[in-house]
Amino acid sequence: MIGWMRDLVLRRRLDQDLAEEIRQHLDEKTDALVASGMSRQDAALAAQRAFGNVTRTEEQGREAWRFLAIEDVFADVRFALRQLRKSPAFALAGILTLALGIGANTTVFSVVNAVILRPLPYPESDRLVSVKSRDIRGTPHPADLSYPTFFDFRAENTVFEHIVSYRDAEFTLTGTEQPIHLRGQIVSSDLFPMLHVQPALGRGFLPHEEAAAERVVILSHELWRGRFGGDPAIVGTTLMIDGQPHTVVGVAPPRFEFPITRDSAQMWTTVARDAASGTGMPVTKQRGARMLDAMARLKPGVSIDQAQAHMDTIAASLAERYPDSNRNQPGTYVRPEIDHLVGDARWPLFILLGAVGLVLVVACANIANLLLAHAEERAREFTVRAAIGAGRARIVRQFITESLTLSAIGCAAGLAVAAWSIRLFRALPVPRVGDAVIDGRVLAFSLALAVVTSVLFGLAPALRAASTELSGGLKDGSRTSTPGSDRLRHGLCVAQVALGLVLVSAAGLLIGSFLHLVRRDLGFRPEGVLTFSLDLPGQEYAGQRQLDFHARLLDQLRSLPGVTRPRSRCRCRSPETR
Protein backbone atom coordinates (compact mmCIF):
# COMPACT_ATOMS: atom_id res chain seq x y z
CA MET A 1 0.00 0.00 0.00
CA ILE A 2 2.82 2.41 0.88
CA GLY A 3 4.54 1.57 -2.39
CA TRP A 4 1.34 2.26 -4.30
CA MET A 5 0.95 5.65 -2.63
CA ARG A 6 4.55 6.48 -3.51
CA ASP A 7 3.91 5.42 -7.10
CA LEU A 8 0.78 7.58 -7.17
CA VAL A 9 2.70 10.66 -6.11
CA LEU A 10 5.51 9.91 -8.61
CA ARG A 11 3.15 8.90 -11.42
CA ARG A 12 4.40 11.42 -13.99
CA ARG A 13 8.02 10.38 -13.48
CA LEU A 14 7.10 6.69 -13.77
CA ASP A 15 5.21 7.36 -17.00
CA GLN A 16 8.22 9.22 -18.37
CA ASP A 17 10.59 6.37 -17.36
CA LEU A 18 8.35 3.80 -19.04
CA ALA A 19 8.10 5.82 -22.24
CA GLU A 20 11.89 6.29 -22.26
CA GLU A 21 12.45 2.56 -21.79
CA ILE A 22 10.14 1.71 -24.71
CA ARG A 23 11.86 4.34 -26.89
CA GLN A 24 15.29 2.92 -26.09
CA HIS A 25 14.11 -0.57 -26.94
CA LEU A 26 12.75 0.59 -30.30
CA ASP A 27 15.95 2.54 -31.04
CA GLU A 28 18.11 -0.51 -30.32
CA LYS A 29 15.94 -2.69 -32.56
CA THR A 30 16.02 -0.04 -35.30
CA ASP A 31 19.82 0.28 -35.09
CA ALA A 32 20.17 -3.48 -35.34
CA LEU A 33 18.00 -3.61 -38.48
CA VAL A 34 19.89 -0.70 -40.04
CA ALA A 35 23.15 -2.54 -39.41
CA SER A 36 21.73 -5.54 -41.29
CA GLY A 37 21.21 -3.40 -44.41
CA MET A 38 17.72 -1.90 -44.05
CA SER A 39 17.01 1.79 -44.45
CA ARG A 40 16.34 3.84 -41.31
CA GLN A 41 12.68 4.37 -42.20
CA ASP A 42 11.99 0.71 -42.98
CA ALA A 43 13.93 -0.38 -39.92
CA ALA A 44 11.83 1.91 -37.67
CA LEU A 45 8.58 0.52 -39.08
CA ALA A 46 9.82 -3.05 -38.71
CA ALA A 47 10.88 -2.42 -35.11
CA GLN A 48 7.45 -1.06 -34.23
CA ARG A 49 5.74 -4.04 -35.89
CA ALA A 50 7.95 -6.43 -33.97
CA PHE A 51 7.37 -4.63 -30.66
CA GLY A 52 3.58 -4.43 -31.02
CA ASN A 53 1.06 -1.84 -29.76
CA VAL A 54 3.07 0.77 -27.84
CA THR A 55 0.01 2.32 -26.19
CA ARG A 56 -1.23 -1.04 -24.99
CA THR A 57 2.20 -1.86 -23.61
CA GLU A 58 2.21 1.45 -21.69
CA GLU A 59 -1.23 0.67 -20.27
CA GLN A 60 -0.10 -2.79 -19.18
CA GLY A 61 2.93 -1.26 -17.51
CA ARG A 62 0.78 1.23 -15.61
CA GLU A 63 -1.59 -1.51 -14.46
CA ALA A 64 1.33 -3.25 -12.79
CA TRP A 65 1.82 -0.43 -10.25
CA ARG A 66 -1.68 0.93 -9.58
CA PHE A 67 -5.06 0.06 -8.04
CA LEU A 68 -7.40 0.50 -10.98
CA ALA A 69 -10.60 1.10 -9.00
CA ILE A 70 -9.08 3.83 -6.82
CA GLU A 71 -7.39 5.62 -9.68
CA ASP A 72 -10.57 5.41 -11.74
CA VAL A 73 -12.37 7.14 -8.89
CA PHE A 74 -9.72 9.87 -8.87
CA ALA A 75 -10.14 10.25 -12.62
CA ASP A 76 -13.93 10.52 -12.18
CA VAL A 77 -13.49 13.17 -9.48
CA ARG A 78 -11.17 15.21 -11.70
CA PHE A 79 -13.72 14.98 -14.51
CA ALA A 80 -16.50 16.01 -12.10
CA LEU A 81 -14.54 19.08 -11.04
CA ARG A 82 -14.05 20.03 -14.68
CA GLN A 83 -17.78 19.69 -15.25
CA LEU A 84 -18.52 21.96 -12.28
CA ARG A 85 -16.08 24.55 -13.61
CA LYS A 86 -17.82 24.42 -16.99
CA SER A 87 -21.20 25.17 -15.32
CA PRO A 88 -20.44 27.72 -12.57
CA ALA A 89 -24.05 28.86 -12.14
CA PHE A 90 -25.25 25.29 -11.60
CA ALA A 91 -22.31 24.54 -9.26
CA LEU A 92 -22.85 27.68 -7.20
CA ALA A 93 -26.60 27.06 -6.82
CA GLY A 94 -26.01 23.46 -5.76
CA ILE A 95 -23.21 24.28 -3.31
CA LEU A 96 -25.14 27.11 -1.64
CA THR A 97 -28.26 24.97 -1.32
CA LEU A 98 -26.31 22.12 0.23
CA ALA A 99 -24.31 24.44 2.48
CA LEU A 100 -27.51 25.80 4.01
CA GLY A 101 -29.17 22.38 4.32
CA ILE A 102 -26.16 20.50 5.70
CA GLY A 103 -25.05 23.50 7.78
CA ALA A 104 -28.44 23.76 9.51
CA ASN A 105 -28.53 20.02 10.21
CA THR A 106 -24.95 19.99 11.48
CA THR A 107 -25.62 22.94 13.77
CA VAL A 108 -28.72 21.43 15.35
CA PHE A 109 -27.14 17.98 15.60
CA SER A 110 -24.11 19.44 17.38
CA VAL A 111 -26.49 20.93 19.97
CA VAL A 112 -28.42 17.65 20.30
CA ASN A 113 -25.13 15.79 20.63
CA ALA A 114 -23.84 18.11 23.36
CA VAL A 115 -27.08 18.28 25.34
CA ILE A 116 -28.63 14.81 24.93
CA LEU A 117 -26.35 12.26 23.29
CA ARG A 118 -23.02 12.96 24.98
CA PRO A 119 -22.69 11.15 28.34
CA LEU A 120 -22.23 13.10 31.53
CA PRO A 121 -18.60 13.98 32.30
CA TYR A 122 -18.25 11.44 35.10
CA PRO A 123 -17.00 7.83 35.08
CA GLU A 124 -19.78 5.28 34.45
CA SER A 125 -22.30 8.06 34.20
CA ASP A 126 -24.97 5.67 32.89
CA ARG A 127 -25.50 4.53 36.52
CA LEU A 128 -26.21 8.05 37.81
CA VAL A 129 -29.89 8.73 38.51
CA SER A 130 -31.99 11.58 39.80
CA VAL A 131 -34.21 10.93 42.83
CA LYS A 132 -37.31 13.03 43.46
CA SER A 133 -40.42 12.68 45.58
CA ARG A 134 -43.72 12.10 43.77
CA ASP A 135 -46.22 14.71 44.89
CA ILE A 136 -49.79 13.49 44.32
CA ARG A 137 -51.51 16.84 44.87
CA GLY A 138 -53.22 17.65 41.58
CA THR A 139 -51.43 15.98 38.70
CA PRO A 140 -48.62 13.81 40.14
CA HIS A 141 -45.34 15.63 39.64
CA PRO A 142 -41.71 15.51 40.84
CA ALA A 143 -41.00 17.41 44.05
CA ASP A 144 -37.85 18.35 45.96
CA LEU A 145 -36.79 16.50 49.08
CA SER A 146 -36.50 17.75 52.63
CA TYR A 147 -33.40 16.97 54.66
CA PRO A 148 -35.11 14.43 56.96
CA THR A 149 -36.60 12.62 53.96
CA PHE A 150 -33.20 12.57 52.26
CA PHE A 151 -31.53 11.21 55.39
CA ASP A 152 -34.12 8.43 55.54
CA PHE A 153 -33.60 7.63 51.85
CA ARG A 154 -29.86 7.45 52.44
CA ALA A 155 -30.11 5.24 55.50
CA GLU A 156 -32.79 2.80 54.32
CA ASN A 157 -32.04 2.19 50.63
CA THR A 158 -30.15 -0.89 49.44
CA VAL A 159 -30.01 -0.09 45.72
CA PHE A 160 -27.59 2.85 45.64
CA GLU A 161 -23.86 2.92 46.16
CA HIS A 162 -24.22 6.56 47.19
CA ILE A 163 -27.01 9.11 47.26
CA VAL A 164 -26.16 12.82 47.50
CA SER A 165 -28.28 15.87 48.25
CA TYR A 166 -27.46 19.27 46.84
CA ARG A 167 -28.94 22.72 46.57
CA ASP A 168 -27.90 26.11 45.20
CA ALA A 169 -26.27 28.60 47.51
CA GLU A 170 -24.54 31.96 47.27
CA PHE A 171 -21.47 32.93 49.27
CA THR A 172 -19.48 36.06 49.98
CA LEU A 173 -15.73 35.53 50.19
CA THR A 174 -13.87 38.16 52.22
CA GLY A 175 -10.36 38.61 53.53
CA THR A 176 -8.65 38.32 50.12
CA GLU A 177 -8.28 41.63 48.34
CA GLN A 178 -11.89 42.75 47.83
CA PRO A 179 -15.05 40.76 48.72
CA ILE A 180 -16.46 38.67 45.90
CA HIS A 181 -19.81 37.00 45.37
CA LEU A 182 -19.60 33.29 44.54
CA ARG A 183 -21.99 30.65 43.27
CA GLY A 184 -21.86 27.43 45.22
CA GLN A 185 -23.56 24.25 46.34
CA ILE A 186 -24.41 22.81 49.73
CA VAL A 187 -23.95 19.06 49.36
CA SER A 188 -23.88 15.92 51.46
CA SER A 189 -20.52 14.41 52.28
CA ASP A 190 -20.25 11.63 49.68
CA LEU A 191 -20.38 13.85 46.57
CA PHE A 192 -16.98 12.95 45.16
CA PRO A 193 -17.20 9.18 45.92
CA MET A 194 -20.59 9.09 44.19
CA LEU A 195 -19.19 10.73 41.06
CA HIS A 196 -16.03 8.56 41.14
CA VAL A 197 -13.97 11.76 40.99
CA GLN A 198 -10.84 12.59 42.96
CA PRO A 199 -10.03 16.21 43.87
CA ALA A 200 -6.97 17.65 42.16
CA LEU A 201 -5.64 18.70 45.56
CA GLY A 202 -6.58 17.54 49.03
CA ARG A 203 -9.57 15.31 49.61
CA GLY A 204 -13.32 15.18 49.49
CA PHE A 205 -15.70 15.66 52.40
CA LEU A 206 -15.91 13.25 55.34
CA PRO A 207 -19.17 12.06 56.94
CA HIS A 208 -18.54 13.79 60.27
CA GLU A 209 -18.17 17.13 58.41
CA GLU A 210 -21.96 17.27 58.05
CA ALA A 211 -22.18 18.19 61.76
CA ALA A 212 -23.34 21.72 62.55
CA ALA A 213 -20.03 22.80 64.06
CA GLU A 214 -17.98 21.91 60.95
CA ARG A 215 -17.02 24.47 58.31
CA VAL A 216 -15.12 23.02 55.35
CA VAL A 217 -15.08 23.95 51.66
CA ILE A 218 -13.79 22.61 48.35
CA LEU A 219 -12.85 25.17 45.71
CA SER A 220 -13.36 24.88 41.97
CA HIS A 221 -10.17 24.60 39.93
CA GLU A 222 -10.97 27.85 38.13
CA LEU A 223 -11.52 29.79 41.38
CA TRP A 224 -8.31 28.33 42.83
CA ARG A 225 -6.23 29.44 39.85
CA GLY A 226 -7.97 32.77 39.27
CA ARG A 227 -8.35 34.00 42.83
CA PHE A 228 -5.50 32.22 44.62
CA GLY A 229 -2.95 31.97 41.80
CA GLY A 230 -2.95 28.17 41.83
CA ASP A 231 -1.26 28.12 45.26
CA PRO A 232 -0.51 24.42 46.02
CA ALA A 233 -0.54 25.22 49.75
CA ILE A 234 -4.19 26.32 49.70
CA VAL A 235 -5.33 23.04 51.31
CA GLY A 236 -5.58 23.52 55.06
CA THR A 237 -5.85 27.31 54.94
CA THR A 238 -8.82 29.20 56.35
CA LEU A 239 -11.11 31.43 54.28
CA MET A 240 -13.74 33.83 55.57
CA ILE A 241 -17.01 32.91 53.84
CA ASP A 242 -20.13 34.83 54.86
CA GLY A 243 -18.19 36.05 57.89
CA GLN A 244 -17.36 32.56 59.14
CA PRO A 245 -14.01 30.72 58.94
CA HIS A 246 -14.00 27.74 56.56
CA THR A 247 -11.14 25.29 56.12
CA VAL A 248 -10.18 24.45 52.54
CA VAL A 249 -9.96 20.64 52.32
CA GLY A 250 -9.61 20.26 48.55
CA VAL A 251 -9.57 21.67 45.04
CA ALA A 252 -11.75 20.14 42.34
CA PRO A 253 -10.21 18.82 39.10
CA PRO A 254 -10.05 21.07 36.01
CA ARG A 255 -13.37 21.50 34.18
CA PHE A 256 -15.23 19.72 36.99
CA GLU A 257 -18.89 20.70 37.14
CA PHE A 258 -21.52 19.74 39.68
CA PRO A 259 -24.31 20.15 39.06
CA ILE A 260 -24.12 20.74 35.33
CA THR A 261 -25.86 24.06 34.78
CA ARG A 262 -25.39 27.24 32.82
CA ASP A 263 -23.64 28.83 35.83
CA SER A 264 -21.12 26.41 37.26
CA ALA A 265 -20.54 26.26 41.01
CA GLN A 266 -17.35 27.88 42.27
CA MET A 267 -17.23 26.13 45.62
CA TRP A 268 -18.89 23.33 47.56
CA THR A 269 -19.57 23.07 51.28
CA THR A 270 -21.38 20.55 53.42
CA VAL A 271 -24.80 20.17 55.01
CA ALA A 272 -23.25 21.67 58.13
CA ARG A 273 -24.28 25.14 56.93
CA ASP A 274 -27.93 24.16 56.98
CA ALA A 275 -27.54 22.14 60.20
CA ALA A 276 -26.47 25.28 62.08
CA SER A 277 -29.38 26.96 63.82
CA GLY A 278 -29.81 30.62 64.52
CA THR A 279 -32.71 30.91 66.96
CA GLY A 280 -35.09 28.20 65.79
CA MET A 281 -35.14 24.65 64.49
CA PRO A 282 -32.44 24.01 61.85
CA VAL A 283 -33.70 23.30 58.38
CA THR A 284 -32.08 19.84 58.45
CA LYS A 285 -34.79 18.81 60.95
CA GLN A 286 -37.79 20.32 59.16
CA ARG A 287 -39.65 17.69 57.14
CA GLY A 288 -41.75 20.33 55.45
CA ALA A 289 -38.77 22.33 54.14
CA ARG A 290 -38.40 20.77 50.70
CA MET A 291 -35.45 22.36 48.94
CA LEU A 292 -33.12 19.54 47.89
CA ASP A 293 -32.28 17.82 44.67
CA ALA A 294 -30.76 14.35 44.97
CA MET A 295 -28.51 12.27 42.73
CA ALA A 296 -27.54 8.65 43.27
CA ARG A 297 -25.33 5.97 41.75
CA LEU A 298 -26.97 2.60 41.18
CA LYS A 299 -25.24 -0.47 42.49
CA PRO A 300 -23.92 -2.79 39.74
CA GLY A 301 -26.70 -4.98 38.37
CA VAL A 302 -29.54 -2.81 39.74
CA SER A 303 -31.90 -1.46 37.09
CA ILE A 304 -33.76 1.83 37.27
CA ASP A 305 -37.09 -0.01 37.56
CA GLN A 306 -35.80 -2.00 40.53
CA ALA A 307 -34.52 1.17 42.19
CA GLN A 308 -37.86 2.89 41.53
CA ALA A 309 -39.84 0.08 43.17
CA HIS A 310 -37.50 -0.02 46.17
CA MET A 311 -37.60 3.76 46.72
CA ASP A 312 -41.40 3.78 46.34
CA THR A 313 -41.58 1.30 49.22
CA ILE A 314 -39.43 3.57 51.41
CA ALA A 315 -41.48 6.66 50.45
CA ALA A 316 -44.76 4.87 51.27
CA SER A 317 -43.34 3.89 54.65
CA LEU A 318 -42.37 7.48 55.38
CA ALA A 319 -45.86 8.66 54.41
CA GLU A 320 -47.31 6.32 57.04
CA ARG A 321 -44.77 7.27 59.72
CA TYR A 322 -44.98 11.04 59.12
CA PRO A 323 -48.47 11.74 57.76
CA ASP A 324 -48.37 15.44 58.61
CA SER A 325 -45.41 16.13 56.26
CA ASN A 326 -45.09 13.13 53.92
CA ARG A 327 -48.63 11.98 53.18
CA ASN A 328 -48.66 13.82 49.85
CA GLN A 329 -45.37 12.18 48.77
CA PRO A 330 -46.07 8.43 48.91
CA GLY A 331 -43.76 7.62 45.97
CA THR A 332 -40.67 8.69 44.09
CA TYR A 333 -39.35 9.40 40.63
CA VAL A 334 -36.07 7.66 39.77
CA ARG A 335 -34.81 8.40 36.29
CA PRO A 336 -31.48 8.76 34.50
CA GLU A 337 -29.65 11.91 35.53
CA ILE A 338 -29.22 12.90 31.88
CA ASP A 339 -33.04 12.97 31.53
CA HIS A 340 -33.36 15.12 34.63
CA LEU A 341 -30.65 17.45 33.35
CA VAL A 342 -32.14 17.90 29.89
CA GLY A 343 -35.70 18.17 31.19
CA ASP A 344 -38.19 19.75 28.79
CA ALA A 345 -35.52 20.64 26.23
CA ARG A 346 -35.34 17.10 24.77
CA TRP A 347 -38.39 17.12 22.52
CA PRO A 348 -38.03 20.70 21.24
CA LEU A 349 -34.48 19.86 20.16
CA PHE A 350 -35.59 16.69 18.40
CA ILE A 351 -38.44 18.58 16.72
CA LEU A 352 -35.96 21.22 15.57
CA LEU A 353 -33.69 18.48 14.23
CA GLY A 354 -36.64 17.03 12.30
CA ALA A 355 -37.49 20.45 10.90
CA VAL A 356 -34.00 21.07 9.56
CA GLY A 357 -34.07 17.52 8.20
CA LEU A 358 -37.11 18.51 6.14
CA VAL A 359 -35.20 21.56 4.95
CA LEU A 360 -32.46 19.24 3.70
CA VAL A 361 -35.02 17.05 1.92
CA VAL A 362 -36.37 20.15 0.16
CA ALA A 363 -32.81 21.07 -0.77
CA CYS A 364 -32.24 17.57 -2.18
CA ALA A 365 -35.37 17.84 -4.30
CA ASN A 366 -34.20 21.20 -5.58
CA ILE A 367 -30.75 19.90 -6.52
CA ALA A 368 -32.26 16.78 -8.10
CA ASN A 369 -34.28 19.07 -10.37
CA LEU A 370 -31.12 21.00 -11.24
CA LEU A 371 -29.29 17.76 -12.01
CA LEU A 372 -32.14 16.52 -14.20
CA ALA A 373 -32.00 19.71 -16.22
CA HIS A 374 -28.20 19.45 -16.33
CA ALA A 375 -28.46 15.84 -17.51
CA GLU A 376 -30.79 16.87 -20.33
CA GLU A 377 -28.19 19.39 -21.48
CA ARG A 378 -25.53 16.65 -21.50
CA ALA A 379 -27.69 14.05 -23.27
CA ARG A 380 -25.42 14.04 -26.34
CA GLU A 381 -22.34 13.50 -24.14
CA PHE A 382 -23.89 10.44 -22.49
CA THR A 383 -25.03 9.12 -25.87
CA VAL A 384 -21.50 9.37 -27.26
CA ARG A 385 -20.15 7.60 -24.16
CA ALA A 386 -22.63 4.78 -24.65
CA ALA A 387 -21.87 4.61 -28.39
CA ILE A 388 -18.14 4.06 -27.83
CA GLY A 389 -18.69 1.29 -25.30
CA ALA A 390 -19.48 2.79 -21.89
CA GLY A 391 -21.95 0.60 -20.07
CA ARG A 392 -24.91 1.84 -18.07
CA ALA A 393 -23.14 1.10 -14.76
CA ARG A 394 -20.13 3.18 -15.86
CA ILE A 395 -22.34 6.18 -16.74
CA VAL A 396 -24.25 5.87 -13.44
CA ARG A 397 -20.95 5.69 -11.55
CA GLN A 398 -19.68 8.83 -13.23
CA PHE A 399 -22.89 10.71 -12.46
CA ILE A 400 -22.92 9.54 -8.83
CA THR A 401 -19.29 10.62 -8.53
CA GLU A 402 -20.24 14.08 -9.77
CA SER A 403 -23.07 14.17 -7.21
CA LEU A 404 -20.68 13.09 -4.45
CA THR A 405 -18.18 15.74 -5.48
CA LEU A 406 -20.85 18.43 -5.41
CA SER A 407 -22.08 17.13 -2.06
CA ALA A 408 -18.57 17.05 -0.59
CA ILE A 409 -17.99 20.69 -1.51
CA GLY A 410 -21.42 21.59 -0.11
CA CYS A 411 -20.59 19.65 3.07
CA ALA A 412 -17.35 21.59 3.54
CA ALA A 413 -19.25 24.85 3.10
CA GLY A 414 -21.96 23.57 5.45
CA LEU A 415 -19.37 22.85 8.16
CA ALA A 416 -18.16 26.43 7.83
CA VAL A 417 -21.76 27.65 8.21
CA ALA A 418 -22.25 25.39 11.24
CA ALA A 419 -19.03 26.55 12.92
CA TRP A 420 -20.39 30.09 12.79
CA SER A 421 -24.04 29.40 13.64
CA ILE A 422 -23.32 27.15 16.66
CA ARG A 423 -22.39 30.30 18.55
CA LEU A 424 -25.98 31.54 18.22
CA PHE A 425 -27.34 28.46 20.00
CA ARG A 426 -24.96 28.85 22.94
CA ALA A 427 -27.18 31.65 24.25
CA LEU A 428 -30.06 29.19 24.82
CA PRO A 429 -30.93 28.55 28.50
CA VAL A 430 -30.21 24.83 28.11
CA PRO A 431 -27.67 22.86 30.18
CA ARG A 432 -24.47 21.85 28.32
CA VAL A 433 -25.40 23.83 25.19
CA GLY A 434 -22.13 25.69 25.62
CA ASP A 435 -20.30 22.41 24.91
CA ALA A 436 -21.70 22.23 21.38
CA VAL A 437 -18.75 21.84 19.00
CA ILE A 438 -17.93 20.09 15.75
CA ASP A 439 -16.32 16.97 17.18
CA GLY A 440 -15.77 13.55 15.63
CA ARG A 441 -19.39 12.46 15.99
CA VAL A 442 -20.72 15.67 14.44
CA LEU A 443 -18.18 15.43 11.63
CA ALA A 444 -19.20 11.83 10.95
CA PHE A 445 -22.85 12.93 10.91
CA SER A 446 -22.05 15.65 8.37
CA LEU A 447 -20.12 13.25 6.14
CA ALA A 448 -22.98 10.76 6.32
CA LEU A 449 -25.37 13.54 5.33
CA ALA A 450 -23.16 14.36 2.37
CA VAL A 451 -23.20 10.74 1.17
CA VAL A 452 -26.93 10.24 1.73
CA THR A 453 -27.90 13.51 0.08
CA SER A 454 -25.68 12.81 -2.93
CA VAL A 455 -27.46 9.50 -3.42
CA LEU A 456 -30.88 11.09 -2.87
CA PHE A 457 -30.49 13.84 -5.42
CA GLY A 458 -28.08 12.03 -7.77
CA LEU A 459 -29.56 8.59 -8.30
CA ALA A 460 -32.64 9.50 -10.33
CA PRO A 461 -30.75 11.84 -12.73
CA ALA A 462 -28.00 9.21 -13.04
CA LEU A 463 -30.45 6.50 -14.05
CA ARG A 464 -32.13 8.94 -16.41
CA ALA A 465 -28.81 9.77 -18.05
CA ALA A 466 -27.86 6.10 -18.37
CA SER A 467 -31.14 5.30 -20.15
CA THR A 468 -30.50 7.78 -23.01
CA GLU A 469 -31.38 6.30 -26.38
CA LEU A 470 -28.50 6.23 -28.88
CA SER A 471 -30.59 7.14 -31.87
CA GLY A 472 -32.36 10.07 -30.25
CA GLY A 473 -29.23 11.43 -28.66
CA LEU A 474 -27.14 11.43 -31.85
CA LYS A 475 -29.70 12.89 -34.27
CA ASP A 476 -28.90 16.44 -33.27
CA GLY A 477 -27.03 18.31 -30.59
CA SER A 478 -30.06 19.92 -29.07
CA ARG A 479 -31.38 19.18 -25.62
CA THR A 480 -34.30 16.78 -25.57
CA SER A 481 -36.95 16.26 -22.96
CA THR A 482 -38.91 13.05 -22.43
CA PRO A 483 -42.33 12.59 -20.79
CA GLY A 484 -40.76 10.48 -18.04
CA SER A 485 -38.22 13.16 -17.24
CA ASP A 486 -40.92 15.84 -17.16
CA ARG A 487 -43.09 13.77 -14.80
CA LEU A 488 -40.16 13.25 -12.43
CA ARG A 489 -39.25 16.92 -12.39
CA HIS A 490 -42.87 17.95 -11.85
CA GLY A 491 -43.15 15.42 -9.02
CA LEU A 492 -40.07 16.86 -7.36
CA CYS A 493 -41.54 20.36 -7.66
CA VAL A 494 -44.76 19.20 -6.01
CA ALA A 495 -42.78 17.59 -3.17
CA GLN A 496 -40.78 20.77 -2.66
CA VAL A 497 -43.90 22.90 -2.49
CA ALA A 498 -45.65 20.51 -0.09
CA LEU A 499 -42.69 20.26 2.30
CA GLY A 500 -42.11 24.00 2.03
CA LEU A 501 -45.73 24.67 3.05
CA VAL A 502 -45.35 22.37 6.07
CA LEU A 503 -42.20 24.20 7.16
CA VAL A 504 -43.67 27.65 6.57
CA SER A 505 -46.84 26.76 8.49
CA ALA A 506 -44.86 25.36 11.43
CA ALA A 507 -42.54 28.39 11.41
CA GLY A 508 -45.53 30.71 11.34
CA LEU A 509 -47.07 29.00 14.38
CA LEU A 510 -43.78 29.18 16.28
CA ILE A 511 -43.29 32.85 15.41
CA GLY A 512 -46.86 33.60 16.45
CA SER A 513 -46.33 31.89 19.81
CA PHE A 514 -43.07 33.77 20.29
CA LEU A 515 -44.67 37.13 19.51
CA HIS A 516 -47.50 36.31 21.89
CA LEU A 517 -44.97 35.70 24.67
CA VAL A 518 -43.06 38.87 23.83
CA ARG A 519 -46.15 41.06 23.74
CA ARG A 520 -47.94 39.63 26.75
CA ASP A 521 -48.91 42.01 29.53
CA LEU A 522 -46.33 41.76 32.30
CA GLY A 523 -48.44 43.70 34.74
CA PHE A 524 -45.89 46.53 34.88
CA ARG A 525 -43.90 48.78 32.59
CA PRO A 526 -40.37 47.37 32.27
CA GLU A 527 -38.89 50.54 30.72
CA GLY A 528 -36.24 52.00 32.99
CA VAL A 529 -36.56 49.22 35.57
CA LEU A 530 -33.24 47.85 36.86
CA THR A 531 -32.76 44.95 39.25
CA PHE A 532 -29.88 43.63 41.28
CA SER A 533 -29.40 41.21 44.15
CA LEU A 534 -27.23 41.16 47.22
CA ASP A 535 -26.52 38.52 49.81
CA LEU A 536 -26.46 39.09 53.56
CA PRO A 537 -24.97 36.52 55.95
CA GLY A 538 -27.85 35.18 58.01
CA GLN A 539 -25.78 34.95 61.19
CA GLU A 540 -24.93 38.66 61.19
CA TYR A 541 -28.08 40.07 59.57
CA ALA A 542 -30.98 38.26 61.17
CA GLY A 543 -34.38 39.66 62.02
CA GLN A 544 -34.41 43.39 62.70
CA ARG A 545 -30.81 43.94 61.59
CA GLN A 546 -31.70 42.76 58.10
CA LEU A 547 -34.74 45.07 57.96
CA ASP A 548 -32.61 47.99 59.14
CA PHE A 549 -30.03 47.27 56.45
CA HIS A 550 -32.65 47.35 53.70
CA ALA A 551 -34.10 50.58 55.08
CA ARG A 552 -30.67 52.25 54.94
CA LEU A 553 -30.12 50.85 51.45
CA LEU A 554 -33.38 52.35 50.20
CA ASP A 555 -32.48 55.74 51.67
CA GLN A 556 -29.15 55.73 49.82
CA LEU A 557 -30.76 54.60 46.56
CA ARG A 558 -33.25 57.49 46.70
CA SER A 559 -30.36 59.93 46.81
CA LEU A 560 -28.86 58.63 43.55
CA PRO A 561 -29.50 60.74 40.40
CA GLY A 562 -32.08 59.19 38.11
CA VAL A 563 -33.58 56.84 40.72
CA THR A 564 -37.28 57.57 41.22
CA ARG A 565 -38.94 54.71 43.13
CA PRO A 566 -36.55 52.26 44.76
CA ARG A 567 -38.09 49.15 46.23
CA SER A 568 -36.63 46.25 48.19
CA ARG A 569 -37.63 42.62 48.45
CA CYS A 570 -36.01 40.83 51.38
CA ARG A 571 -35.06 37.17 51.06
CA CYS A 572 -33.75 36.06 54.44
CA ARG A 573 -30.80 33.67 54.51
CA SER A 574 -31.41 32.34 58.01
CA PRO A 575 -32.41 28.66 57.83
CA GLU A 576 -35.25 29.03 60.32
CA THR A 577 -36.97 31.69 58.17
CA ARG A 578 -36.99 29.80 54.87
Image (cartoon, grey):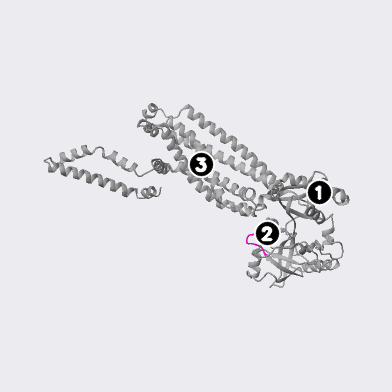
- Which residue occupies 26% across, 40% down? 54
Quadrant position of residue 394: top left
Q: Nearer the viewer, mark 1 or mark 3?
A: 1
Q: Which residue is disc 1 drawn over?
A: 314
Residue 93 seen: no
Q: Which residue appears farthest toward the left when viewing the image?
A: 37
Residue receiving disc 3? 451
Image coords of residue 292 (percent x, y): 77, 55
Disc with the residue nearer the chain's start (2 vs 1): 2
Q: Residue 145 lies in magenta, yes or no?
A: no
Looking at the rendering, which quadrant does residue 176 occupy?
A: bottom right
**Quick check: 17 left or right of 207?**
left
Q: Amino acid at mark 1?
A: Ile
Q: Amino acid at mark 2?
A: Ser
59 sits left or right of 200 in the view: left
- Determine whether 480 is above or below 198 in the image: above
The single residue placed furthest to the right in the displayed view is: 324
Cα–Cα span, label 1 and label 3: 53 Å
Three-letter code for the amino acid on which mark 3 is drawn: Val
- Magenta residues? 251-259
The residue beneath circle 2 is 264
Cα–Cα span, label 2 and label 1: 33 Å
Percent x, y for residue 564? Answer: 77, 63
- Name the N-terminal-most of marks 3 and 2: 2
Give the SS element for disc 1: helix
